[in-house]
Image (spheres, rainbow, N blue to C red):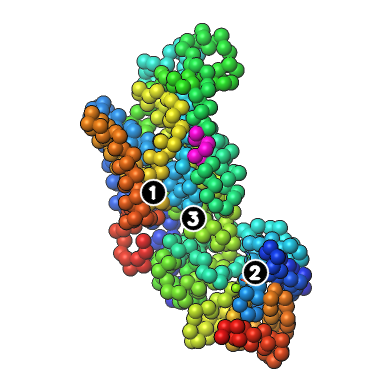
Amino acid sequence: MGEGLEQLSHVSDRAGVGAGMIPRWVAPCVVVAFAFVMYASGGFVGDYASRVMLDTGIMMIAAVSLTIVNGFTGQFSIGHAAFMAIGGYVSGWLTYYGLLATLGRTTDLGAEHGWLLLPAAIIGGLAAAGAGWLVGLPSLRLRGDYLAIVTLGFGEILRVLLQQTDRQRFSSQEMSEVGLLGLIVPPDVGGASGFESIPKLTNLAWVYLMVGAVILFAIRLKYSSYGRAMLAIREDEIAAESMGVNVTRMKVRAFMFAAFFAGVAGTLYAHQPGTLLRPADAGYARSFDIVIMVVMGGLGSISGATLAAIVVSLLNVGLLELADYGAMKWRMPIFALLLILIMIFRPQGLFGLREIWDFFRSRDRTGGGR
Amino acid sequence: MSLLEVKNLGISFGGLRAVQDFSLSIPPGGLFGLIGPNGAGKTTVFNLLTGVYAPSDGTIELAGRSLVGLRPFQIAEAGLSRTFQNIRLFPDLTVLENLKIAMHLRGRHTLAGTILRSGHFRATEADQTRRAMELLSIFDLTDRADAYARNLPYGDQRRLEILRAMATQPRLILLDEPAAGMNPAEKLALAESIRRIRTDFGLTVLLIEHDMTLVMDVCERITVLDYGQIIAVGEPAAIQKNPKVIEAYLGEVANER
Ligand SMILES: Nc1ncnc2c1ncn2[C@@H]1O[C@H](COP(=O)(O)OP(=O)(O)O)[C@@H](O)[C@H]1O
Ligand SMILES: [Mg+2]
């Protein structure tokens, strides 16, 4: 017992877990990166570069949020884009018709409307989380990989449903003709031809603020009683339940958290300058990209997913650059090959469950591990 | 009054009656044993008691409260915890995290408290770390707190599983062949630890053990299962001489040959 208490002093400096788990140099790095992005949003980088940074940031949010389900609880969701689409369509509907009704226009907005993105993102996130609850509850009750099938199916159903929506209204006069109920059932979000002219509220500052928020959320979750209960499910579901973890509840919660941030990412995507929101945005092609990022980064590694999101996004940009030489048709084969190579040589992903900074610790302290 | 009261418990898998008419009564502070040849149904009894399987008949009461129909996490909450015959640690998490997960049910936080790192959150985390280190000191494992569970030697993994079960703060703890794979010296040390756990932590223990000597050594009272049915109940000395028990174990030796 005495020896145990002696050891306590060495552990208690880490007792506040979370903060203590992460070395001191991480936070300054994050702040410097954030400051750079803020600076960039002031026109330091060109339109093209800032566009790439917007896209990358949105994918980072999507990848980190999916990590909570696929990485923490070990379930396999492959329909994350569907929750992005729900967030995007719901928030886009609100800001578009809201501004059309009050201002009479949705473009050429001044900076004074910038704050609208925050409530839009929260509502988009909540809508997606609600959908996550509906989709997740029946399948997460069961043991086994039902979630993959259900989420894939959900994305495809949503895509088809979105194609059946009504055409978009472009003036407040048209709006009053159909009335509020007419705008809602079925929603007038443009059907197969897409939803356009959504207010351009997204900028680099908002995107990277949300990136910071989701990373902070995920890290603090991971190093907490709450998050450990989720990790336990991934490690051994039967043992977790026997040790007092309400497995179904934790799975559903993880799924809703992930859906919430997917909804936020979708909101940012929808309000990006020049976005045409299309039903295909809910489909599997986009979901597949996000799954690749999470698997590549290492199921459960937040920093890994973040890094993989950057790599995959930049790879996409590179291929797009080479589109004239027919590079786009190589996109799927390249990603598939990448995934296969990872599965063969590093099945746990680049970082496994670990974070980048875990690799800077002495082996002695962590006792090795993968 | 007894802490655990099991009456006429039974379960079938398809046509197989894996456990039939199983009854057991353990007083608070008791250290009881459950033995029997391989495949007798011992682990199945544990799975019934902890809600992994739903019994087809019978009743289970812990301190007067029925456990039938509760899910495993609710049974853990009620004060019954266990280890697994085939070790089921959380391999990719650290020793400390393994223990803290088992403390989850007694120290939960709101989501807001977790994300904002509230004072209550930090206090609970620190308290859990302290208690985990105390538990680790029972088996001299404090210096392995940061090791990943998968990297522990086999014997330490078994010990960690016992500690993890204790971390749920149970009243009754079920140990499924905790000495499996240990050498005689380790078994002796384990027997000593089990006795200590009982006295120091006021726990009641039900022990499954394939190895007769260990059970005879530590248990006050033993129930013997064969083919899912109780063939003998009594004190170690009497069990050792019971012809039915000897026959069941001899039969096993014959089968193995
Ligand atoms: N889930 C199950 N499905 C079918 N048969 C099972 C199941 N669990 C246990 N059994 C059977 O029940 C019997 C008792 O097994 P078990 O309780 O593991 O024995 P013991 O722990 O005494 O060695 C065995 O014949 C085993 O095959
Ligand atoms: Mg067994």
Res A300 visible: yes
Tell me the element at label 1.
Answer: helix
Q: Which residue is mark 2?
A: B44
Local packing at callout 1 (Cα closer than 10 Å; few below 14, some 14-19, many 20+) is: many
Is B82 situated above or below A204? below
Is A133 situated above or below A159? below
Residue at the image point whose x is 35% and y is 28% from the top: A203
Please identify, in this view, whether the residue under mark 3 or under mark 1 is nearer the observer.
1
- Nearer to the camera, B163 or B240: B240
Q: Position of residue B13 (x, y in %)?
A: 67, 64
Left or right, A349 with reference to A156: left
Q: Main secondary structure of the magenta part?
A: helix
Please name the amino acid that badge 1 sits on.
Answer: Val
Residue at the image point whose x is 59% and y is 62% from the top: A242
Please identify, in this view, whether the residue under mark 2 or under mark 3 is nearer the observer.
2
Tell me the element at label 3.
Answer: helix
Disc 2 within 8 angstroms of ligand 1 (CB): yes
Q: Which residue is mark 3?
A: A234
Image quarter of the C terminus of chain A: bottom left
Give me the C-alpha separation between circle 2 and circle 3. Answer: 24 Å
Question: Which chain is disc 1 placed on?
Answer: A
Local packing at callout 3 (Cα closer than 10 Å; few below 14, some 14-19, many 20+) is: many
Residue at the image point whose x is 41% and y is 30% from the top: A268
Is B94 situated above or below A89? below
Q: Which residues are magenta?
A: A151-156
> Quarter-wise, where is residue A34 in the image?
top left
Q: Which residue is mark 1?
A: A295
Q: Position of residue B175 (x, y in %)?
A: 59, 73
